[in-house]
Amino acid sequence: MNHIPILCEELSYCLTQIPSGHVIDCTFGMGGHSRIFLDYNWKVTAFDRDESVKQYLPNHSNFNFINDKFSNINKYNLNADLIFADLGMSTMQLTGNRGFSYLTNDSLNMCMGFNDVTAVDILNNSTKSELLQIFKNGTDLPNVTKYANNIEQFRCAKKILTTFDLRDALNTQNYSVLSQCFQAIRIACNNEIYELSSLLKNTCSNMMIITFHSDEDRPVKHNFEQSPFFGYFLPSEDEIKNNIKSRSAKLRFKFKNSFIIPANFKHKIYK
Ligand SMILES: C[S@@+](CC[C@H](N)C(=O)[O-])C[C@H]1O[C@@H](n2cnc3c(N)ncnc32)[C@H](O)[C@@H]1O
């Protein structure tokens, strides 16, 4: 299994423009981005709430790992020059029979680590209006009421326990809808909106965050727009061709000091 890290050329370019220091990689995953920081001589403190990532930790004197949620960063008194996060889940989680994928029939857990509830709890115990809010927060779908209704109807007859139960409950064959509804349940189960809002309260003046959907991108955009130098990169057509998962990604950044992007740099900066 291979997790292809996203927007690496763009990250590397930024690292050539700022002095190396101490970075907190909030989302270690399989370590693709942490390794880029190490290559550019950064000292890396990596967080991940999922303890199964420990198998991927680099053995490097500049690397330190903390198995915790990034909302807890302030507990550790770390003085960082840069905070980096690549939101969402890794390939290891998606293909790990943990209930994140609608493609295989697994029990519906969806927990990344240090969770208070599972997806089964959410789907069977939330009221219809709570479900509606979960779908509104976690999808870009125009009409989510029918999915909340479908779930309520389904669970009157049968508890939702597996990924295929959830597919049946949603009652759609549309892969985009399935993927967005699964995403919404994952976001709720892992309290991702709270996690991101805690991260954005951090006072570090240099931050880079890869976002994947509008509800996580919007607060990052609003926060970064208050900084002297901000913008975002999109994956190139080549990257999207090689790694379809990058298609919805944006690498947003804010830096205390600006730097010049050369005219011949192939990756455009958007504002
Ligand atoms: C998209 S993957 C990161 C991939 C990584 N950049 C790489 O190159 O391999 C996201 C990772 O962040 C972790 N994660 C998500 N939310 C988190 C949180 N609030 N606190 C700590 N880790 C989190 C997930 O467990 C997952 O391993």
Image (cartoon, grey):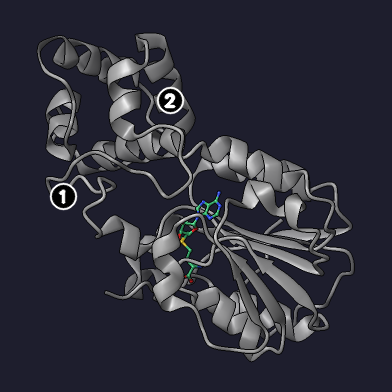
* Residue 130 visible, this orientation: yes
Q: What residue do we see at 15% from left, 16% from top? A: 154
Residue 162: percent from left, percent from top: 16, 36
Residue 9: percent from left, percent from top: 57, 80
Residue 210: percent from left, percent from top: 57, 59
Is residue 78 positioned above or below 192 on the image? below
Q: Which residue is mark 2?
A: 134
Is residue 108 positioned above or below 134 on the image? below
- Left/right placement of residue 127 relative to residue 263 reads left
Along the line of sight, which residue is nearer the eye, 161 or 265?
161
Amino acid type at mark 2:
Ile
Is residue 85 positioned above or below 11 on the image? above
Along the line of sight, which residue is nearer the eye, 232 or 139?
139
* The N terminus sits in image quarter: bottom left
* Residue 266 visible, this orientation: no
Q: Is mark 2 within 8 Å of ligand 1?
A: no
Q: What residue do we see at 76% from left, 67% from top? A: 82
Q: Which residue is mark 1?
A: 103
Determine the CA span between mark 2 and mark 1: 21 Å
Q: Tell me the element at label 2.
A: helix
Q: Residues within 10 Å of mark 2 (few under 14, many from 20)?
A: many
* The C terminus sits in image quarter: bottom right
Q: Residues within 10 Å of mark 1 (few under 14, many from 20)?
A: some
Q: Which mark is residue 256?
A: none
Residues at badges 2 and 1 in contact (C-beta under 8 Å)? no
Q: What residue do we see at 67% from left, 39% from top? A: 197
For residue 151, which quarter of the picture? top left
